[in-house]
Amino acid sequence: MAKATHSGAALADGLVLDIHDLSIQFGGLKAVEALSFHVKEQEIFGLIGPNGAGKTTAFNCITQFYHPDRGQVVFRARDGRVLDLVGLPVHDIIRLGLVRTFQNVEVIKELTLIDNVLIGAHTDFKATILEQALRLPRARREEREMRAKAVRALEFMGIAHLKDAPAGGQPYGVLKKVEMARTLMAQPKLIILDEPAAGLNDSETAELAETIRRMRDEYRCTILLVEHDMRLVMNICDRICAISFGQFLACGTPGEIQGNKLVQEAYLGEEEPE
């Protein structure tokens, strides 16, 4: 077991994330209750459940947008450290290599696509505000390096030809790619995707599936996603965790989840998905 440097947590070899006894409530509503699961290095892991099941709340607890009432979120950072993320500032978590997208696309419409992607590298700039304001050598060098990195991320997503176009007015599918390209700027160890297929048509969803696999393989990162499109989830995930009303229901391979009677009844209906 690898010992942590924060809160005395530990993480088994081969794991990048271990959620243990995660709980949070809002007023009298228990949004997530005693939820536990783990995610392996460089796997694509899905979290499924109907609206209101607590999936996004769990994501917000992992990234510390919400502070859980109880539990641990143990993470292996990109530098190899093992830490309990609970209580850490969000910007520190990003520096550790944990980044996310949101259900609603978050872009600044007045900026170009490349400038929106560059926002994802803000924690890695070393030049001071004064150096940047005076355009001193280190600031200019960093800007050249980061812009080249942003172009590579846009090329990876297939939209580099639009890099200087404003985000406003771009098709929804393009904006989704911009948001995913932005995550690649943070040297990700773990990327959390919150309903990445929402609003996409069938051909765009098929392209998304291939993109997620390529992100995992080429950037050697782990993917954790919430998604309602069961066809996509069953197609790309190595393992899946199903939750109901914020509580753990089942975890396993796509085949195991499809064959689980409780999951069929709660999420997939009586018939297995095609």
Image (spheres, rainbow, N blue to C red):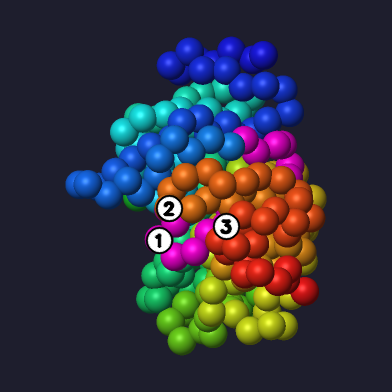
Q: Is residue 185 above or below residue 270?
A: above
Looking at numbered disc 2 in the image, what kind of residue is underneath it?
Phe
Image quarter of residue 183: bottom right
Q: Give the residue displayed 73% in from the left and 68% down from the top.
A: 272
Mark 2 is surrounded, within 10 Å at the Cα level, by few (under 14), some (14 to 19) or many (20 or more) other residues, namely: some
Image quadrant containing the C terminus: bottom right
C-alpha span from label 2 to label 1: 7 Å
Task: Tell me, yes or no, whether the highlighted magenta stretch contains residue 137.
Answer: no
Nearer to the camera, 79 or 52: 52
From the image, tell me which residue sits under label 2.
245
Q: How many marks?
A: 3
List x then y, in percent, for residue 262.
61, 54
Image quarter of residue 82: top right
Looking at numbered disc 3 in the image, what kind of residue is underneath it?
Ile
Task: Determine whether label 2 and label 1 are within 8 Å by CB.
Answer: yes
Nearer to the camera, 158 or 6: 6
Nearer to the camera, 12 or 42: 12
From the image, tell me which residue sits under label 3.
48
